[in-house]
Amino acid sequence: MSGVKTFSGLIGLFSICALPLAALTEEPRERTQVFAVCLGRASAEMEHRWLIGGGAESEQDRRAMFEMLLDTVAPSSGLPGPQILDMRIRAKMAHAQLLQIATFHTDPDRKRRAAAAARRAMRPCSALLLS
């Protein structure tokens, strides 16, 4: 039962943070939040690819782009560095948990749902780099 609560909690966290495109305004504070979340997710994707093999280089490039974007907007955001780091770490840990479930869980349905949730979470971040 606690596994279901954990998975539901992760989905809730992603629903809060999964709207980077809608949240991306001219406000440096909001841009900083979006880029911090995307950087955290990209870090989790990169590390996961290193662990399981394949595709780590492209994930490393994506992560570097979000790091550059965050470094550009963060100074004008007014957000303290520790708060920005907290956003990055929370997003990274939540995304890493989804990737771990998607890769290693024994329940095929849960693996499928976690993989779908991880893909949905990365879509808005990927769209930011394409725009």
Image (cartoon, rainbow, N blue to C red):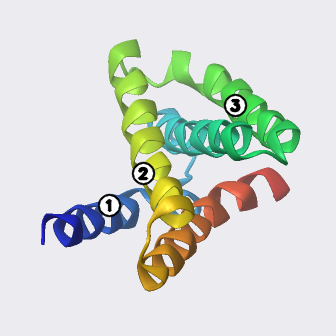
The residue depicted at 61 percent of the width and 36 percent of the height is: 43
| Earlier-in-chain disc, 3 versus 2 | 3
In depth, the one of 15 and 99 nearer the eye is: 99
Q: Where residue 92 appears, x then y in whole percent?
A: 47, 40
Element under disc 1: helix
Type of the residue with mark 1? Leu
Q: Where residue 21 appears, x then y in whole percent?
A: 59, 61
With respect to residue 38, does 104 lie above or below?
below
Type of the residue with mark 3? Leu
Disc count in the image? 3
**Dot 2, how many residues are within 10 Å of its Cα: few (below 14), some (14-19), or many (20+)?**
some
Tell me how far mark 3 sits from mark 2, CA to CA. 25 Å
Nearer to us: label 3 or label 1? 1
| Earlier-in-chain disc, 2 versus 1 | 1
The residue depicted at 46 percent of the width and 33 percent of the height is: 88
Element under disc 3: helix
Nearer to us: label 3 or label 2? 2
With respect to residue 21, does 120 lie above or below?
below
Q: Residue 10 carries which label?
A: 1
